[in-house]
Amino acid sequence: MESTVGLSANGEPAIVQDETKVDVSFHLQPGSLIVTQDGKAFEAYHASVEFVDVHDHGPWLVDTARFTAKGPDGKSVVLSVDLLNDTYDGPRAGVPAAIWKVVALAATTAGDIGLTYATPDPRPM
């Protein structure tokens, strides 16, 4: 558990980037996804999916999926796949169905199940 003892902050945070991105990450059940690259099989245990708003307030598109996985030698690696096509208007062709299932899980986690955020009420002292 993290402690915030001794932590303070002030200011008015502002986003600098013109392009808005949302990164959704989650742990995968062991053995549920095997990613193969260059003939080597990697057991993915964490996924991170990045969504972008490339058309200013248009529909969000999926940009990248990253997988942290154990290789045949037991060492961890990060594997990445670009999911947005070269014209930035839709999905890249030839992406395996299992990766699109991970994207669907990320989209569900991000909002389809109703996750919302509200600023916490001030606590009485």
Image: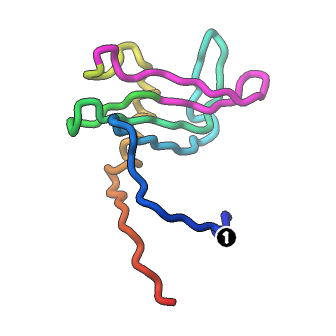
Is 111 positioned to the left or the right of 29 in the image? Answer: left
Towards the viewer: 122 or 44? 122
Q: Residue furthest right?
A: 73
Give left or right: position of 56 versus 104.
Answer: left
- Camera-side residue of 79 and 16: 16
Q: Amino acid at mark 1?
A: Gly
Residue that lies at the very extreme toward the left in this rendered image:
58
Crowdedness near tag 1: few (<14), some (14–19) or many (≥20) residues, C-alpha within 10 Å: few
Measuring 76% from the left and 28% from the top, which residue is drawn there?
75
**Residue at horizontal 44%, vertical 20%?**
96
In the rendered image, the residue lying farthest to the bottom is 125
Q: Is residue 86 magenta?
A: yes
Q: Give how far across and how far down residue 62 sits, in percent.
A: 36, 31
81 to 28, vertically: above or below = above
Residue under the point 20% across and 36% down: 58
How many numbered callouts? 1
Check residue 71 for magenta coloring: yes
Dot 1 falls on a residue whose secondary structure is loop
Image quarter hosting the N terminus: bottom right
Q: Position of residue 82 (x, y in %)?
A: 44, 21
Which is nearer the eye, 83 or 16?
A: 16
The residue at which mark 1 appears reads as: 6
Q: Does 109 sit above or below residue 5?
A: above
Q: Is residue 68 left or right of residue 111?
A: right
Residue at 29% across, 30% down: 54
Residue 15 position in % (x across, y down): 39, 46
Residue 91 at x, y percent in the picture: 32, 22
Magenta highlight range: 65-87
Residue 7, compared with residue 92, is above or below; it is below
